Image (tube, coloured by chain):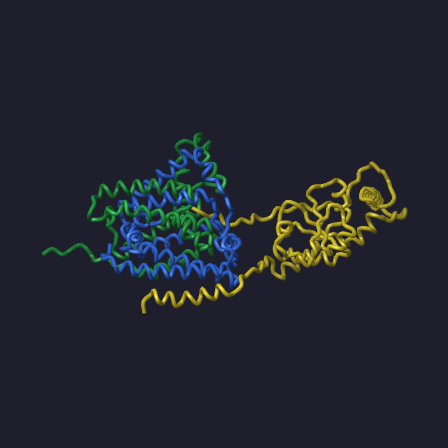
Chain colours: A green, B blue, C yellow
Amino acid sequence: MTKSKERKARPYINPYVGGVLLGLVLLAANFVSGRGLGASGAIKSTVVTAMNTVAPEASANSGFVKEFGEAHSGSPMKTWLVFEMLGVLVGGFLSGSLAGRLRFKVEHSPKITSRRRLIFALAGGVLFGFGSQLGRGCTSGSALSGMAVLSLGGFVTMMAIFGTAYALAYFFRKNWI
Amino acid sequence: MGPLSVNEIISENTNLFLAFIIGIGFGFVLEQSGFSSSRKLAGVFYGYDTVVLKVFFTAAITAMLGLLFFSLFGWIDLNLVYVNPTYLTSAILGGIIMGAGFIMGGYCPGTSFCGASIGKLDALVFIGGLFLGVFIFGLGYNLWEGTYMANFLGSPKVSESLGMSDGIFAFLLIIIALAMFWVAEWAEKKFPREEY
Amino acid sequence: MKPRTLLAMFIIPMGLIIAAVPQNKTKPYKLTADQLLAEVNTRTQYITPDAVADMIVKKDPSLRLIDVRSQEEFEKFSLPGAVNIPVNDLLSDKYTDILNQDVKMNVFYSNGSLVANEAWMITRQLGYINNYVLEGGLNYWFDAIMNPQKPSTVNSDEEFAKYDFRKSAGAALGGGGVVASTSEQTSASPKPAIKPAAKKKKAAGGC
């Protein structure tokens, strides 16, 4: 009889408790830095840095890089969001290891293949990356943090994201249920 | 008096270090709540797992109330806190594209980092897609710069636009959020669920 | 008890409180009482009428005169180019941009220097810079610039230079007597430099 190597992973915490904790983290961010959480900005920083490194003249002329440069002085990687996202990686890892959830896997509904899941993940990522730039934020930066400070733009973006996802849910149902 | 960084009570480097610490808290809470799982995240759109709704709105009302109370006690100057600007066209358009990305990819940038940190390969691929998407946006920036900058309304708050005080709007949102929680619980009872 | 119910029981009263209580609109003080006293004691907020007259004559664009008396008094007489911000209205939102900035030099004046000083103290405590008080106010202004006293012969050259300057400035500003002296009309005291405001950055955020 072989001993199962799988430890039973700890369950997730109660969502309301998690919500309160997340709200407190958001509050701390606003209190310390005067801004809310975010994520897509870190991706933007990395892309701008890559563009600057690989093709300096071309990117110096790029409207995108210029717009970024107007808002940020100094190195594009030395921003609040980049440091925050590094923290997210550490925090997620800590939590996962404490709860026994560390495992390389492709998570997908049993009704589809891994390959299909990965294709959709890529496509979803491309769309989300593009949309987050247009919308000036993602669900963390625009929707969540925006709502906490009552920003109109935040609310509008949030409603657009969730509304569209609900509207399209029917077409992608095979991937999930 | 907060915000600490804007009032120069802490230095820029301390601010960045604290950003890292706050990020750790962010990632930890997200993962503990199950946001590292794309199936849980997508569940809210089908009703079988409404964790996104509960966590999201609870966090929003907690932080909102927290900020308003801090301001009441004089612990923070809300005029110095960043309020997201409103560019109406791109906010809506971007949101629509993101919504499509969400339902297809099952992640958003923050949660994808969370998922990637515990080894989810689909999260990693999603992040790759994010880079591609941002890059594409940057390449063609001149094509959509007009849309991107259209309809700038400043940084209005929803309470201002609706003509009510911040506090009253916060209360309204609390009621709406609680109503949604009750509906969410009802929806989950209707669908069988297994923990992912 | 279920967390959801616990949450609701806690958060609804909090929401009611926050909805009912009026918002905290007080502008925070940036300077402590000690700091303000130290500044008051150095009297650096004063600017001489000579310096101001010089700026007016030279049409210096960085000068902004602020009359803190009532509107009536302002309409009866005011210095050229002055703006009227009655001291009771000093904290109104419509004047914040004028008072809290780093482009122009604001000089408060009143009949004496009492009310102008009041305005200066209040704005200084809020952390605003580049605000000054016209030494002696309008009373001294009339005496010194508009009707300068010719110094007796035992006074130094400096005094004479000041007198010459004041006469021409007074003439330029509509006072009596005239000396079309084309010699250097240097102001007797240098005007203070405009300090750039500390970068009042609202935190950059987003994304």
* Residue A115: x %, y % from top left: 22, 41
Residue projecting furthest to the left:
A1
Q: Is residue B3 visible?
A: no
Q: Is residue A115 above or below residue B62?
A: above
Disc tally is 0
* Residue C25: x %, y % from top left: 56, 60
Q: Is residue C101 left or right of residue B56?
A: right
Residue C178: quadrant of the picture: top right
Q: Is residue A57 above or below residue C66?
A: above
Residue projecting furthest to the top:
A57
Residue at image position (60%, 60%) is: C32
Q: Is residue C166 left or right of residue B176?
A: right
Q: Is residue A4 visible?
A: yes
* Residue C51: x %, y % from top left: 75, 46
* Residue C38: x %, y % from top left: 66, 58
Q: Is residue C75 above or below residue A132?
A: below
Residue in the foreground of this view, choosing between A2 and A126: A126
Residue in the foreground of this view, choosing between C76 and C25: C76
Q: Is residue B130 left or right of residue C77?
A: left
Residue projecting furthest to the right:
C153
